[in-house]
Image (spheres, helix red, strand yellow):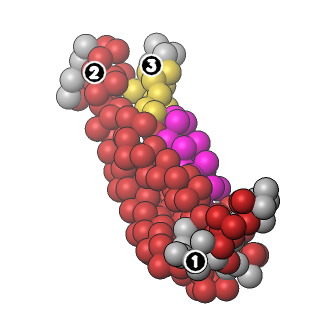
Amino acid sequence: MRRGRLVAVLALLAAGALGLLAATQPWATAVLVDGRELAVAGQDLAGGLTILSLASVALALVLPIAGLAWRFALGALAVLLGGLTAVHALASRAGIPVAVEALVADATGLAGTAQAAEIASLAEAPWPIVGAAAGLIAIVGGLVALVTARRWPQRARRAERYERGTGLAWDVMDDGEDPTR
């Protein structure tokens, strides 16, 4: 069944792309009383999100050419990878206040209660949730791969038409033909 393979591969590609997008966006923006805006990048908070997203893309590229046993292993790996991606994105969201404090300290040279007075507003973006959604999409892709792996078409094995040691492939080549056709 080609549809299962297509869904699994597209889900993993989408998960990787969405995770990379989430990792490169600002997850929070603090506006200081003097009007300066300080952005906390997702990469600073969830550095592992980029790596996990690239791993999803790599799985999507390898999965279609894998044999049956490897399809099951890669499907299970995709489920695990998706879970790690979702947990990492959501857990990294808790680091936003600390990252904002560090940015404000660098920008103003102040710390503690004086620093809090310098922040006019703090806005969190939905990118951590988008990163978690990427993980959930990878889980779906992995589950689809696990459920449909047995129904995927086998890769062509043209060389298996000739038994090893019989010399039939050599005979065909001696006749000027290609034994792989």
Alpha-carbon distance for marks 2 and 3? 14 Å
Q: Quadrant of residue 177?
A: bottom right
Q: Is residue 116 above or below residue 106?
A: below
- At label 1, the amino acid type is Thr
Q: Quadrant of the N terminus?
A: bottom right
Q: Which residue, given by chain and number where applicable, does mark 1 sit on?
A: 166
Alpha-carbon distance for marks 1 and 2? 77 Å
Q: Earlier in the sequence, mark 2 or mark 3?
A: 3
Residue occupying the point 27% across, 21% down? 105
Q: Quadrant of the C terminus?
A: bottom right
Residue occupying the point 34% across, 15% down? 107
Q: Which mark is residue 33?
A: 3
Alpha-carbon distance for marks 3 and 1? 84 Å
Q: Is residue 127 above or below residue 75?
A: above
Q: Which mark is residue 105?
A: 2
Q: Is residue 92 magenta?
A: no
**Magenta stretch, overall SS:** helix
Front one among 52 and 128? 52
Front one among 91 and 4? 4
Residue 63 left/right relative to 178: left
- At label 2, the amino acid type is Ala
Q: Earlier in the sequence, mark 3 or mark 1?
A: 3
Mark 2 Cα-neighbour bin, 10 Å: few <14, some 14–19, many ≥20: some
How far across and down, in percent of the image, does residue 109 sit? 25, 13
Image marks 2 and 3: residues in contact by CB distance under 8 Å: no
In this view of the protein, can residue 98 be seen by the observer? yes
First to last magenta residue range: 11-27
Q: Callout 3: helix, strand or loop?
A: loop
Residue occupying the point 76% across, 76% down? 3
